[in-house]
Amino acid sequence: MEFQRVDKKAKTKWRFSRIMALILLVIPIAAVVVFMFYVSDDGRSGDIFRIMGWITGGAIVLFQVLSIILYPPIEYIQWAYLIAPDRIEIKKGIFYRTHTVIPISRIQHVAVTQGVLQRPFKLSTVQIHTAGDVMEIQELNTEVAEEICSKLQKRVNVKVEQKKNMEAQTGQEAESEV
Amino acid sequence: MFEKRRCHFTYIFEMFARFIYVIVVVVSTIAFNIASNLVSDEDFMSQFREISGVVMSSGAIMALIVIGALVLVSLLILLLCAFVWRYTFISAEENTLIYESGKFIKRRVAIPFEKINTIDMGRNIFERMVGTCRLKIDTGAYSNRQEKNNAELDLVFSLKEAEQIRSFILSRAELDSRAEDAETGKTAVAPKEPDWIIKAGMGDFVLYGLTSSSVWKLFWALVAGVFFVVEIAQGFMELAIDYIAPYAEWTAEALSRTNIALIILGLLIIYLISALVSDVWTVIWAAVRFYDFRVAREGRNVIVRYGLITVKNYTLQVRNIHALIIRQNVFQQILGRCSVEAVCMGFGDEKSETALLFPIIKTGDLNRLLSVILPEYVTEMNVRPKNRAGIYYHIVKPAIIWGAIFAGTCFGCSFVPEISPLVNALAILLFIAVIAGRVLSYRNTMLDWNDSVVSVQSGGFKKTAYRIRTDAVQEVQLKTNVIKKRFGIGSYYVHYHGPTFNNTSVSGNISDKFFAGLAESIED
């Protein structure tokens, strides 16, 4: 079995959501930084403040530009999931990479969610709830997400049945021993 | 089955005791305000003297009003508690424990016996005086609590009755191997005394006190440090007022005025005295808290009992114990001792509640005792071959970072010759401590698994080892970054099912080649 990638539209969605974040958050912050260190002092403050202002503003813009242009293709390559008969594996992260393995039998329930920004791209997130945590497979095509959800639910049911049968068998064996 | 039973009448006072603080604070504040307004009113005072015929000072009248209000409100609350007690019942049907309360606002909780996780019997000094016992019954559910952050049921019965109910529930829940013996008709018989396997003695308490008071020692050392800093600051202030001089100059002069050797001697003496006091205090506290500590395995349950003033007696079902946490601070690591607590569903989700199995035990005896109490958790940790990059991340990298910080501080202070030797000495000591902690951290970091248990160990001066039942492990994660991935190391996160949400144990900077094996081991 091979690892599957998230939907190709994820790259566009990530870019779109980050542009929105840039507009909503980063531009006002950068404006304040530039205003504080450059515009408001009428050129009276030392060069050090001016340089600091440029570096801070530049770093913010550079980070956002990277996260809009460069990161999505890398993320697309790094993000992967595998749904095997007995386990789910999820890989994610650019610099800090996380590899998660969840046995199917530990799944409590599975949910499909769709955010406002996901809706125009027909993308969804599959949430896998265990007794200890919630893991997500993000940016899947909605149809694929629903298919995964129902498939997982079936597998969970099969596992539960198998476990019940095993317990019943063990119980019978114990009784017969008594 | 048993019919409806009411709690012991002292339940009224125990309920009332929960409101005392609120009553005193709220009622006395309101009454005091009203009384102060009244006594400042001349008409009221003259009328009061006229009607009562008693000449009293305004202070006495105020006290009378406040005390009167307190008594009145207390009586009302007491009546309310008595009303609640009158309509609170516990009963048992074929497979269910029923809790009912309320006359006007009725509440009925039905708990199937098989869902009951822990039955906790506790007695504080008041309950011991009146011969009652607090019975806590918990299913481990996160909601539907009788009270927020509390057990599902928390009721007070006479000791005999509590033991009968506990025994009955245990037998019904098939928790006890003596199930059929325990049940006789409608009521259950008093349980037999279990065969105690572990009993803690005075020597254990002394050792526990000596090895676990590091926090207190640190606290007292901090107090002493603050005291002397204030003294020095006074010197600074005097100088600052006298002279307007560059900071470095008057810092040096202020410190030269105070004899540094005297400060160190004073700190040392205060530290030693406080350490001694805190040690004695911790030994006494441990002796009182863990007095007569006993652990027994009975059928499918582990029974723990301890306490002098507040007696704790809890029953943990083995199937609900999902992990063991073995803790060792630096003193315990040196002396080869550890404390063990169980992660048990339905236990430990309340404030400051831990299911202690052994407060202190020889590390060498741990597996021997576990083989009797919880053989499922007996495991010898195999030291997985450690990656060389692990040495870099555990020891070399922190050494470089901390070394740079300390070197920078020493360099900065070298311009103030008076304090420079002291800072250098402190920096060297702290650097040695940091390196020692990191070496210990490298030594203590381990990961191991077998068919039944996943073992995760980490920590430097405070070592923590988790032995997690394989079927309680929910997921495993390997976290790494670009550089660590190149070196083939990562941090292992093991998420397990515990009484609270998101229980995780972490072991950092271990070779990533074990991940596939670990992931495979937790699959069915």
Image: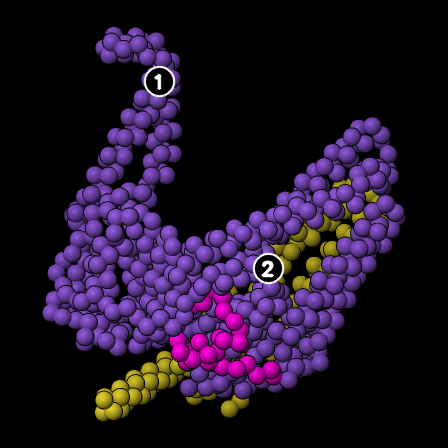
Chain colours: A yellow, B purple
What's the chain of the residue with tag 1? B
The residue singled out by tag 2 in the image is A21
Seen from the viewer's position, the closer of residues B401 and B225 is B225
Q: Which residue is mark 1?
A: B60
Question: What residue lies at 23% left-to-right and 89% top-to-bottom?
Answer: A178
Judged left or right of residue A15, residue B176 is left
Specify the segment rendered in magenta: B356-384
Label 1 amino acid?
A: Ala
Identify the residue shown where x is 53% and y is 73%: B363
Residue B429 as seen in the image, left or right of residue A123: right
Q: Chain of mark 2?
A: A
Residue B431 occupies which quadrant of the picture? bottom right
- Crowding around mark 2 (Cα neighbors within 10 Å: few <14, some 14 to 19, many 20+) is few
Residue drawn 42% across the image and 86% down it: B524
Left or right of residue A79, residue B37 in this image: left
Let me know if residue A10 appears in the view: no
Q: Secondary structure at mark 2?
A: helix
Q: Is residue B411 magenta?
A: no
Q: Is residue B347 above or below residue A135?
A: above
Marks 2 and 1 belong to one chain: no
Disc 1 packing (10 Å; few <14; some 14–19; many ≥20): few
Q: Secondary structure at mark 1?
A: helix
